[in-house]
Image (tube, grey):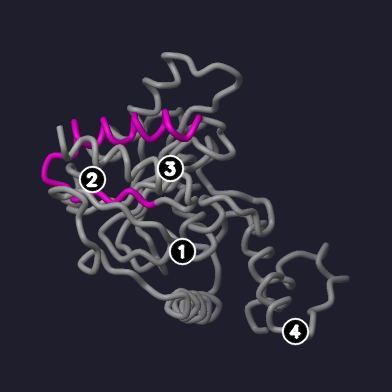
Amino acid sequence: MFLIRALLDEDDEYSGIRIPAGEAAQKKLLRSLLNVRPPRPAGDDFLKLQDEYLREETARKGITDIDALIPVSDGIYLWRGDITTLRCEAIVNAANSGLTGCYLPCHGCIDNAIHTFAGVQLRLACAAIMEKQGHSEPAGRAKLTPAYDLPCDFVIHTVGPIVNGEVTEGSRSLLESCYRSCLELAEENGIKSVAFPCISTGEFRFPNAEAAEIAVSAVRKYRGDIEVIFDVWKKLDLQIYGELLRQYKQA
């Protein structure tokens, strides 16, 4: 209730919003307010309670440690689950070109989930990167931030290509560049484990099977000594990645 009231008090436009009675509805309202909040500093009292609340919510969902996973092959893992509950050194965010997260209340994208459970500090950190950069984030590159309230240490943000119609060689090259750029950035910063979502599938419409082929090929080519987790959400992607990784293991 403290967090909701603090967020409502930040904007006069929220003066007519009534706080619902049920816990589930209150949590939905809180997430919505966090999602639409612009990147700006927050007070120490707010941050302290926000951090406690988000870490408790993540712990309640259940944290999975990379040490509990069984590799499919040397240094490569396949896991189906919520990437915001994964404890490894870095997780990758499939971001948009604005880099400051998804502003649609309670949207189902990974960008929304990561920014929600990392806390408002993440959006502010990304906004600082964008202000210094002075232009939208191009596809195929990578940026590094702390993970704040997530169980991992860092978030690597990358913008995948958007597919409209047929998949072009340019889109394939950009998607490979996403994986390469993330791994190179991890190596530069001494990060030893990275979890990748299915970049550019879903909202960005890259076909799942082809995206997975590019992902697995790029990781095998560029990962070096970094442990890599392919984190999938859909059963379809679990099947696709499972088959691809079996083929590579047998090759």
Under mark 1, the amino acid is Ala
Q: Three-letter amino acid code at disc 4?
A: Gly
Residue hosting label 1: 118
What residue does disc 2 label? Answer: 186
Q: Residue at x 61, y 54 (%)?
A: 108
Q: Amino acid at mark 2?
A: Ala
List x then y, in percent, for residue 38: 63, 54
Q: Tag 4 or tag 3, which sits nearer the N-term?
A: 4
Cα–Cα span, label 3 and label 2: 18 Å
| Secondary structure type for disc 2 | helix
Stretch of the chain drawn in magenta: 207-231
Check disc 1: other Cα within 10 Å, few if <14, some if 14-19, many if 20+. many
Residue at (44% x, 76% y) in the render: 55
Residue marked by disc 4: 22
Q: CA distance from mark 1 to mark 3?
A: 20 Å
Q: Which SS class for mark 1?
A: helix
**Type of amino acid at the residue the image marks with label 3:** Cys
Task: Identify the mark nearer the N-term, 3 or 2.
Answer: 2
Based on the picture, tell me whether residue 129 belongs to the magenta stretch: no
- Write down the residue under mark 3: 198
Q: Secondary structure at mark 4?
A: loop
How busy is the neighbourhood of tag 3: few (under 14 within 10 Å), some, or many (20 plus)?
many
